[in-house]
Amino acid sequence: MNTAEQHRLLQDYHEKGFAVLENAFPRTLAQACCELIWPLTGCEPDDPRTWREPVVRIAEMTQEPFVQAANTERLLEAFDLLAGPGNWLPRQSLGSFPVRFPVNKPANDTGWHVDASFPGEEPIDYLNWRINHRSRGRALLMLFLFTDTGIHDAPTLVREGSHRDVEQLLLPYGEGGLSFMELAGLLDTLPERPVSAATGAAGTVYLCQPFLVHRAQDHRGSKPKVMAQPALEWSF
Ligand SMILES: O=C(O)CCC(=O)C(=O)O
């Protein structure tokens, strides 16, 4: 990564709350990952007759292509740049994969939110997980694109600059912070911000500040979209 790219990543990350890393992992690796994901969805990527639901979620995948995709030299360099050398834990999987299909049915998971980062009193239920002003547990939110994602292909929507509003909102709540649901309920009170769509070629990774407000949307394109949205965890 040259100095100009480093500068752009840092500037976008701090100002907009996300930096786009193109060619973060090879397209061939993205295809190898999709080959492992398709059988688990129960759908054929090229046969619309098999697409029934707007979203199918696949849980953690730990096979070699996923580990390789998460640990390319380019990504590790970007993690050092944005989280600080030695401050983050390497990923051995890529979290869950929402696979979105263009079907005539709206998805029920398209609300604005901030991903939670540490367990609350009922750790089993993700809606009770919490977020605090120093982003305990999470250095980055990452959006990994495994298929080419154009504007109609359900790109994740992000509110540019919203990470700064969320940090201010969380400050008075101290170490305990807010639960995922409590924070989601307050997002309407935040200032309006420009909305961007996380489009890009397979192999692109959006490196996001953990407080970035984002949401999924319905697929209006023609080919299913595969992505992952893992956290980069702090090492401390
Ligand atoms: O599917 C997407 O575009 C994003 C999903 C998401 O933000 C989530 O599940 O937390």
Image (tube, rainbow, N blue to C red):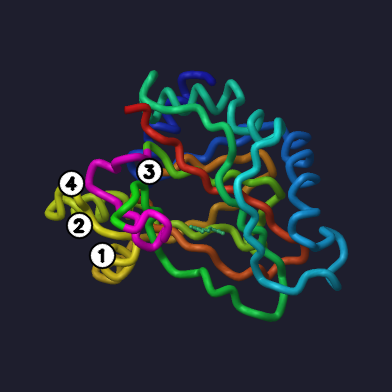
> On the rendered structure, is 142 left or right of 98?
left
> Where does the image place residue 119, in percent across and percent down from the top left?
34, 50
Q: Mark 2 highlights which residue?
A: 169
Q: Which residue is mark 1?
A: 190
Q: Is residue 10 left or right of residue 190?
A: right
Q: Total label count? A: 4
- Element type where label 3 sits in the image: loop
Tell me which label, 3 or 1, sits earlier in the chain: 1
Is disc 1 placed on a helix, strand or loop?
Answer: loop
Is residue 21 found inside the magenta-colored segment of the image? no
> Of callouts 2 and 4, which one flags the residue occurring earlier in the amino acid sequence?
2
Q: Amino acid at mark 4?
A: Glu
Looking at the picture, tell me which residue is in the foreground, 81 or 35.
35
Task: Identify the image quadrant of the C terminus.
Answer: top left
| Vertical relation: 212 (above or below) 93 | below
Can you identify the residue that label 4 sits on? 175
Q: Amino acid at mark 1?
A: Leu
Q: Nearer the viewer, residue 208 or 92?
A: 92
Q: Marks 3 and 4, Cα distance to the nearest angstrom?
A: 19 Å
